[in-house]
Image (cartoon, coloured by chain):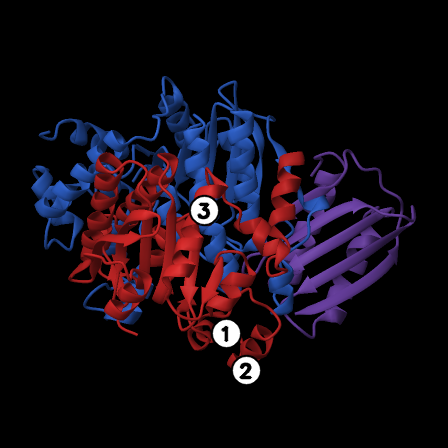
Chain colours: A blue, B red, C purple
Amino acid sequence: MNAPVYTNLVLRHSYFEATARSRVAAVLDAGSFREFLPPEVAQPSPHLAILDIPGAFDDGVIIGSAALGGKPVLVIAQEGQFMGGAVGEIHGAKIVGLLRRAALEKPAAVLFMVDSGGVRLHEANAGLIAISEIMRAVLDTRAAGVPVLALVGGSCGAFGGMGIVSRLCSAIIMSEEGRLALSGPEVIETVAGVEEFDSKDRALVWRVTGGKHRYLTGDCAELVEDDAAGFRQGAIDLLAGWNEPVPSSAGLRAEQERLSRRRQRFAGMRDGLEVWAALGVPDPRQVSLIDRDSLVALKKGLPA
Amino acid sequence: MTLNEILDSLFPAGHDVAVAGQLVAGTAQTARGTVAVLGTTDAAAIGHDIALGLAGRILDIVDQHPGRAIVFLVDTKGQVLSRAEELLCLNGSLAHLARCVDLARRQGHVSIALVTGEAVSGGFLSFGLMADKTYALADAQVRVMDLKAMARVTKIAHERLVELAGSSPTFAPGAENYLRMGAIEAIWDTPSAALLEAALAGQAAAGAAVDGRMRAGLARQGRRLAADTVSAVLAA
Amino acid sequence: MENLEFRFAAQPVKPAAGAALCGVVGSGNLEILIRPGDEADACTVVVKTSARGFGKIWEAVIAEFASRHPVGGTRIAINDMGATPAVVTLRLGQALGDYTGGAQ
């Protein structure tokens, strides 16, 4: 391996390991972010205090306005290091409020930096209801003509209800390190056994839920490097010429067709390696080894 | 109470609702005309097949029966826990189902969900909680996880959780808590045609449905922070 | 969880903007929020920590910091998930640096 070269002290910052605040600072135009309900005017969740757990002033999510490539955007960034980015009452309501504001204000887009295991169990009912409200708010915002982009590359991935929310967005941008699914591998292992899903087999978890797999199967629109610059450029590229579709039966029929066909095509498969082979990848084991650019090229060359 | 007993109580004027596997589908007669009936039974775990089955039927209703009201019957223990299902992005199929319910609303279909058995997490999110209004039968079990499992995961003593659940609706299972928090509109002692028709009529009169659950939760004092938080974000 | 409150006499400090936040309430970490306070020559500190029984150590760590840096005229709020004294001192320095204008 080559020694890393530090040019002008600009290091590559892992998006996976970064905090939500540093992601916001690095993905959006420098100095453009204005936070709504910043920590100095906010209160930590009283539901956590009752359970004797210290809260966070922002309740684990940062919202506000900013610019991306000069265009006005609204931003949501979940903090995976606080309670796994999980959604409680205040956390969820901040997201709903931001999305409703977007439907009224009509910025160029909403950037939703997802980093969450789903419902915060300490506020289970409030979290589940909030995720349902987020689901409807995402669709209302999109119906108002505002694209909502999900950025999935944090250490907690996008699981549970937040996995559903991510797939309700206009498009998903993922890094190889990002993970997107419904039930976490640990939950499946606990309930169905280690033979069903060995959550400690990191390579397997990645082949089932990871960014490269979701990219090859078309469940995420773009695959980017694990740094803020990659996500930034990915969002700028996607938004250039983006036309948010009006909700229609024809559009959902096409999706129904796509999902039904692939359900049949990949029936019985349990590992990304099988799916990639069926997609026509000549040597599926290479997928985990090649870099992002090579994988994008590989996907372009696959049979339609 | 069996599904057939529930159907006969809700639709005494007749119905042709059939069960295939755990997917419930058909039409029924009410004082307000023919309604579509869709849902799940026997605490179904929702996987791709049920999600796509329900989604396809919703699209058929939207395309072939403009304006027809939809009654969702909810009995789900959550999502299928399976590696094969996750491999094909189960969250994507549940999102697709949710989008179909949302499309029906935008196209003018009134939708009512009734929790007849269990309503848990992802299965509940994908259609029951996407309807215009959600109702529950008195013996319905609505939850994310039970308190014993929650005690294990959060490392908070079970006795303490039981004690706190008496004063806060925020985390403990139960339809009553979801009612107080605004996500369930009412709890019905028994399934009845009169209650269903009143619910359908009320929703039709309310017009294009906006998500009023936060306001309801505030009015019922079960969820006091969410509505004000949204107002503060809009004013920021 | 334990709630701790302290007040230290300290040299006044001038904020660059309004408030400064540093850190995340994650395992072994903490967040520190510094805001303007009411007394120019004192600093009040409120700590909410997941680890009980460390009040004396908190008092010593923050007193040491307040004696070395001008922090008068501030209110400091800390939410802690078991940070070590070294991490607390590091974050206090970062937060104060942000509060006074990014000089670190």
Q: Amino acid at mark 3?
A: Gln
Image-quadrant location for residue B162: bottom right
Q: In the rendered image, which residue does mark 1 sit on? A: B155
Instruction: Give the answer, above or below, for where A142 lies relative to A17.
Output: above
Query: Which residue is at a point 34% across and 25% down the rendered structure image?
Result: A245
- The mark closer to the camera, 3 or 1, is 3
Residue in the foreground of this view, choosing between A15 and A59: A59
Q: In the rendered image, which residue does mark 2 sit on? A: B159
Image coordinates for residue A9, horizontal then vertical, percent: 51, 30
Say which chain tag 2 marks.
Answer: B
Tell if the residue under mark 2 belongs to the same chain as the one under mark 1.
Answer: yes
Tell me, for residue B67, which label it has, or none: none
Image coordinates for residue B87, horizontal then vertical, percent: 21, 51
Query: Which residue is at a point 53% across and 50% down the rendered structure image?
Result: B213
Q: In the rendered image, which residue does mark 3 sit on? A: B203
Image coordinates for residue A88, horizontal then vertical, percent: 53, 56
Q: Circle 1 — which element?
A: loop
Q: Amino acid at mark 2?
A: Glu
Image coordinates for residue B172, horizontal then vertical, percent: 50, 70
Tell if the residue under mark 3 belongs to the same chain as the one under mark 2.
Answer: yes
Horizontal side of residue A294 vs A54, given as left or right: left
Which badge, 3 or 1, comes first in the chain's sequence? 1
In space, the residues marked 3 and 1 are separated at their CA atoms by: 42 Å
Viewport quadrant of the N terminus of chain A? top left
